[in-house]
Image (cartoon, rainbow, N blue to C red):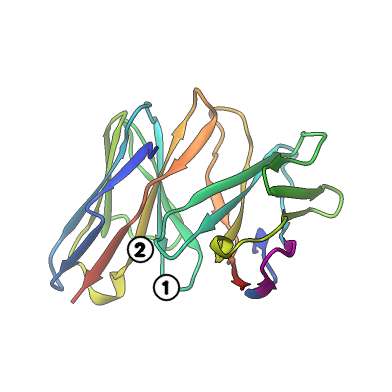
Amino acid sequence: AQKITQTQPGMFVQEKEAVTLDCTYDTSDPSYGLFWYKQPSSGEMIFLIYQGSYDQQNATEGRYSLNFQKARKSANLVISASQLGDSAMYFCAMREGVSPGRDDKIIFGKGTRLHILP
Amino acid sequence: GAVVSQHPSWVICKSGTSVKIECRSLDFQATTMFWYRQFPKQSLMLMATSNEGSKATYEQGVEKDKFLINHASLTLSTLTVTSAHPEDSSFYICSARDWDKNEQFFGPGTRLTVL
């Protein structure tokens, strides 16, 4: 069963607009972490933001914020004031278990390709 | 700056040959490293979890005899694609876990093309 679901294969957004990338997840583990990564055409994985399952507040990192709705198992990424350089592939990811010694592999969704239009 | 390096960044080889890819953590000790494979326009798929000093744990469907993983030191893990075939052509990405910082870092990836 797919654990990370990204329903938007591609999105086109006008520059300077805000954009929301959807992500839902599935886990029975009460302890988990959620990540968003950006992958430009160069292939490198750029870490954007992290949300722990026990974090009370939504994570924010500059123009990035994570809309964490735990009951709905949703972890949408919001990019404010989009820029041309934001055009890339975006992956939502999850790690089950956050304690050392646990199987802490990160698994990825299928990704959303974001195109920012000038 | 980059904290995980991979070498080579790209490699082209003939079918039937073996290719070794190195993954190094540059300024931290990584007891656990992960190897992912990414086909064009697809997501990263975890191949195996590599633990220093022990055998790697492979994900279902990944041939352990074809993809040999060695994690001989706390800063180096290697992935050897044995008897490579064109269908093994892919982007291979490693990731290393820094337990002290509770962070995981990704390498820049290695693009393998098998002719």
Q: Which residues are magenta?
A: A12-21
The answer to whether the residues at label 1 and label 2 have Cβ atoms under 8 Å apart is yes
Of labels 1 and 2, earlier in sequence is 1
Callout 1 crowding tier (Cα within 10 Å): few <14, some 14–19, many ≥20: few
| A112 versus A34 height, above or below | below
Residue at the far top in the pictured view: B100
Q: Position of residue B102 (x, y in %)?
A: 55, 29
Q: Which mark is residue A84?
A: none
Q: Pick whichever, A62 or B114, lies toward us.
A: A62
Q: Pick whichever, A27 or A115, lies toward us.
A: A115
Q: Position of residue A69 (x, y in %)?
A: 83, 50
Q: Main secondary structure of the magenta part?
A: strand
Identify which residue is drawn at 26% across, 55% down. Answer: B9
Pointer 1: what residue?
B40
Asked if labels 1 and 2 share a chain, the reply is: yes
Identify which residue is drawn at 73% across, 55% down. Answer: A78
SS label for mark 2: strand
Residue A62 placement, left or right of B103: right
| A116 versus A24 height, above or below | below
Residue A89 placement, left or right of B68: right
Identify which residue is drawn at 56% across, 53% down. Answer: A37
Amino acid found under the numbered disc labelled 1: Pro
Residue A110: quadrant of the picture: bottom right
Badge 1 sits on which subunit?
B
**Is residue A14 found inside the magenta-colored segment of the image?**
yes
Q: Which mark is residue B91?
A: 2
